[in-house]
Each structure stands twice: as structure tokens, then as C-alpha cells.
């Protein structure tokens, strides 16, 4: 069951477990004052069991390859064979 957070003008904020199908509380269970349901930013969930892998829902990003430069034995011409000028 989810935990819902409410704010009461007299008692302050409180949390209560409710079914998703239940209507939101209108009155504070302690003092009977009108309450307001808050949107909780501290929501987390846990995936238990086998079959949940981190890589299943990612788009693989190819690694950037360094630009092909001239070979060490080349004088900058970019050829694949050794340069005659290098000798």
C-alpha cells in the first residue's frame, strides 16, 4: 500500500497508508480539521527478484574513436604505405 502525506493546519503534516482505490482524506484523524494531500518528492521504488538489469533499458552509446591521423612513419601525407620522404 502506498504512503500518502497530508498537511493539517493544527497538527502539521502526517503520513498514512491507504489503498490506491481509497478516496483522499478530507479531515484530520486526530483533530477533525480539513487536510490537504501533499505531493511527495521523496518517492523511491525497489525492483526485487531476478530479471531486472540496468542495461536492459539503456540505449548503448558507441564510444568516440580518435581521428585517424598520419602514420608515425609518414610526413603528413596520410598515406597507408611508408613515405619515401621519411627515409
Image (cartoon, grey):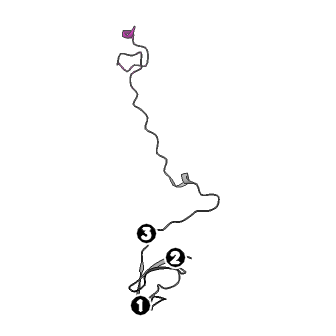
Report the residue that reaches farthest toward the front.
11
> 41 above or below 84?
below
From the viewer's perspective, is the residue at label 1 or at label 3 nearer?
1
Q: Quadrant of residue 38?
A: bottom left
Mark 2: secondary structure: strand
Question: Marks 1 and 2, Cα distance to the nearest angstrom?
Answer: 20 Å
In the depicted view, which residue is nearer to us: 16 or 74? 16
Residue 76 within the segment the image draws in magenta: yes
From the viewer's perspective, is the residue at label 1 or at label 2 nearer?
1
| Chief SS of the magenta region | loop
Residue extent of the magenta highlight: 69-87
In the depicted view, which residue is nearer to us: 86 or 12? 12
* Lower position in the chain sequence, tag 2 or tag 3: 2
Identify the residue under disc 1: 33
Residue 22 circle label: none
Report the residue that reaches farthest toward the bottom.
32
**x then y, percent, for residue 74:** 39, 16
**x then y, percent, for residue 33:** 41, 90
Mark 1: secondary structure: loop
Q: Residues within 10 Å of mark 2 (few under 14, many from 20)?
A: few
Residue 85 within the segment the image draws in magenta: yes
Q: Residue at x 52, y 76 (%)?
A: 3
Q: Residue at x 54, y 51 (%)?
A: 55
Question: Marks 1 and 3, Cα distance to the nearest angstrom?
Answer: 24 Å
Mark 3: secondary structure: loop
Identify the residue under disc 3: 41
**x then y, percent, for residue 68:** 40, 28
* Lower position in the chain sequence, tag 1 or tag 2: 2
Residue 3 circle label: 2
Amino acid at each position: 500500500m502506498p504512503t500518502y502525506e497530508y498537511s493539517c493546519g493544527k497538527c502539521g503534516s502526517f503520513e498514512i497508508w491507504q489503498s490506491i482505490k481509497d478516496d483522499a482524506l478530507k479531515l484530520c484523524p486526530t483533530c477533525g480539521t480539513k487536510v490537504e494531500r501533499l505531493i511527495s518528492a521523496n518517492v523511491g521504488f525497489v525492483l526485487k527478484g531476478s530479471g531486472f538489469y540496468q542495461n536492459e533499458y539503456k540505449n548503448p552509446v558507441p564510444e568516440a574513436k580518435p581521428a585517424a591521423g598520419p602514420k608515425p612513419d609518414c610526413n603528413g601525407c596520410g598515406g597507408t604505405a611508408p613515405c619515401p620522404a621519411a627515409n
